[in-house]
Amino acid sequence: MNSIRAIQQLNKRELEAGINPEGSWHTDYRDTAFIYIGGLPFELSEGDVITIFSQFGEPVWIRLARDKETGKSKGFGWLKYEDQRSCDLAVDNLGGATVMDRVLKVDHTRYKPKDDEDMKDNTMGEVDDNTAEGGGRRKRQRIESESGSDDDRPLLPEEIELEKAIRDLDEEDPMKESMVERLQEKAASAVKKYKKSKRKEKEREQKHHRSSKRDRSRDRDRDRRRIKHDDSEDEDRHTLKERWSRRADSEDEERHKKKEHRSRQNSDDERRRRSSRRSRDDSRARGQARDKVSERSDRDRRRYSSDQEDRRRSHSKRAP
């Protein structure tokens, strides 16, 4: 942020003083068409950066700093314009601009390519000579972002220190290469340590998630067993209730049968008693009738005998 404010103050003073382009501080970098770009969002690819910076000129080369192991963007890089004057426009207009909530830092730089680094135009993709099909045919391959799950990783202090050294150290300084290498090793170690801590944190989260999942599974199993047990108890209670109900119904039916049997038995006894009483009454009546007939016969016999006796007496009296 300090360099951004410094560039803005320089531009403001030159504008207020009316300094022409030949006297501008940009003329110190007329020998280089490279710019340094910092504060890039980690999600941006080379193609995205070219799209942003092509509004001020024609980019002919780009390099984003990427992690050697994962290939993820580190949030800074270098770009070369076809026309050096495009660098002045990019530095003045894009320095301090906000892209995806990150503030861009744009400045002139004298980029020193590595010995094996290809400085050919790579803004349209990598050039591939297809010798198997006659050679000479060139294929343009679109540069795609290699961003991944850790694109949101913040720039570590060691990486910021490395970025600052690459940008600020004089290219003619004989100690720059060794210092940059040392800072690169330091930054790589810090990134490795950071990733290791993140990996352990992720493993802990996964372990906790698995543990929570097992706990939830055990809870579900326990709930299912409890529900099954409750259902079994309900079924047992229902079965027992049905058994008791059937038993009660059976007992009621048995009592009813016994009651009916006793009722029928009492009715039969009553009928027998009534029949016996009727028989006794009939027998008594017949006896009484016989007694009456016998008594009448006796009276008749006695009357007849008396009459006979009276006639004999009367006859004996009339006889001489």
Image (cartoon, grey):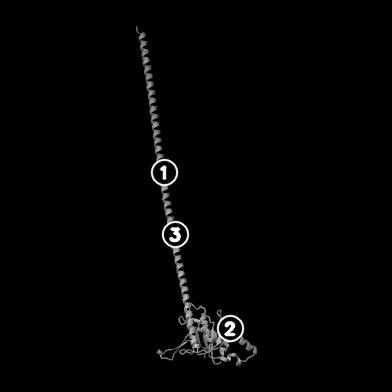
Q: Tell me which amino acid carries mark 3.
A: Arg
Quarter of the view holding residue 13: bottom right
Q: How many marks?
A: 3
Please give the residue where the numbered disc 2 appears in the rendered image.
Answer: 2
Q: Secondary structure at mark 3?
A: helix
Question: Tags 2 and 1 in contact by the CB under 8 Å rule?
Answer: no
User: Which callout, 1 or 3, points to the residue nearer the camera?
Assistant: 3
Please give the residue where the numbered disc 3 appears in the rendered image.
Answer: 226
Tag 3 or tag 1, which sits nearer the N-term?
Answer: 3
Work out which residue is located at the far top of the displayed protein and give it. Answer: 320
Residue 199 placement (x, y as % from top left): 46, 75
Q: Secondary structure at mark 2?
A: helix
The span from disc 1 to disc 3 (Cα, nearest Å) is 42 Å
Q: Residues within 10 Å of mark 1 (few under 14, many from 20)?
A: few
Q: Residue at x 37, y 19 (%)?
A: 298
Q: Residue at x 45, y 70 (%)?
A: 207
Position of residue 232 relative to residue 135, above or below, is above
The span from disc 2 to disc 3 (Cα, nearest Å) is 67 Å
Residue 188 placement (x, y as % from top left): 47, 81
Q: Is residue 165 left or right of residue 298?
A: right
Please give the residue where the numbered disc 1 appears in the rendered image.
Answer: 255
Residue 131 placement (x, y as % from top left): 41, 90
Quadrant the N terminus occupies = bottom right
Position of residue 45 relative to residue 288, above or below, is below
Q: Residues within 10 Å of mark 3 (few under 14, many from 20)?
A: few
User: Which callout, 2 or 1, points to the residue nearer the camera?
Assistant: 2
Observer able to see residue 44: no
Q: Is residue 80 left or right of residue 260?
A: right
Q: Camera-side residue: 141 or 266?
A: 141
Q: Tell me which amino acid carries mark 1.
A: Arg
